[in-house]
Image (cartoon, helix red, strand yellow):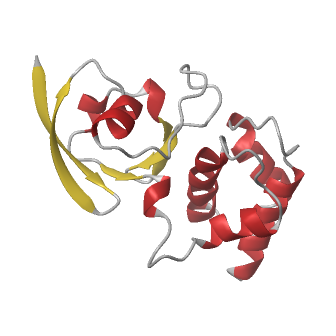
Amino acid sequence: MKTLITLNINGDAREIYIDARRSLLDILRDELALMGAHRGCDSGDCGACTVIVNGQPVTSCMMLAADWNGAEILTVEGMAKDGQLHPIQRALVEKGGIQCGFCTPGFVMNIKALLDENPKPTEAEARAWLAGNLCRCTGYAKIIEAVMSVAEESA
């Protein structure tokens, strides 16, 4: 049975009929062609599918889309504006905080949530916040450097 829901994604209201058993990640990728959130572990442990829902980072693989009717959802596709990378994205590129890129969208979204809540985190606070995001390539140091550089720029 299909359920009609409205998702406000990246500033655009989208009405969609969904199977109420499907995850938010499934709907974003399969129904709305928003491929930024990646399916990694499918158990909420890797952070690759992180999006921001109503101002909070969530692992979209673990959330039923039907539970988010009317929610404000920000995906990595909504971060760049007018063809320009968001400062978080730019810092990750400049500091070498991306390699294969699989984990990057999840990191971008969690970094945004961190800096929205705490614009001046310490390095320890940034590391603790991002502990749920796994990366097999970068070793994390460059990602943390990127976070700290964005925080310094916003001073």
Q: Is residue 119 visible?
A: no
| Image point (63%, 73%), residue name | 87
Relative to 96, does residue 5 appear above or below in the rendering? above
User: Which of these two is toward me, 14 or 153?
Assistant: 14
Q: Is residue 16 visible?
A: yes
User: Which of these two is toward me, 148 or 13?
Assistant: 13
Q: Quadrant of the C terminus?
A: bottom right
| Image point (70%, 46%), residue name | 129
Relative to 93, does residue 34 appear above or below in the rendering? above
| Image point (37%, 29%), residue name | 26
Task: Decide if residue 4 is on the left or right side of residue 146.
Answer: left
Q: Quadrant of residue 143?
A: bottom right
Q: Quadrant of residue 30?
A: top left
Task: Decide if residue 38 is on the left or right side of residue 154.
Answer: left
Q: Position of residue 57 (x, y in %)?
A: 51, 45
Q: Position of residue 59 (x, y in %)?
A: 51, 34
Q: Position of residue 21 (x, y in %)?
A: 27, 17
User: Which of these two is toward me, 133 or 104?
Assistant: 104
Q: Position of residue 6 (x, y in %)?
A: 17, 45
Tally the marks: 0
User: Which of these two is toward me, 152 or 75?
Assistant: 75
Q: Quadrant of the N terminus?
A: top left
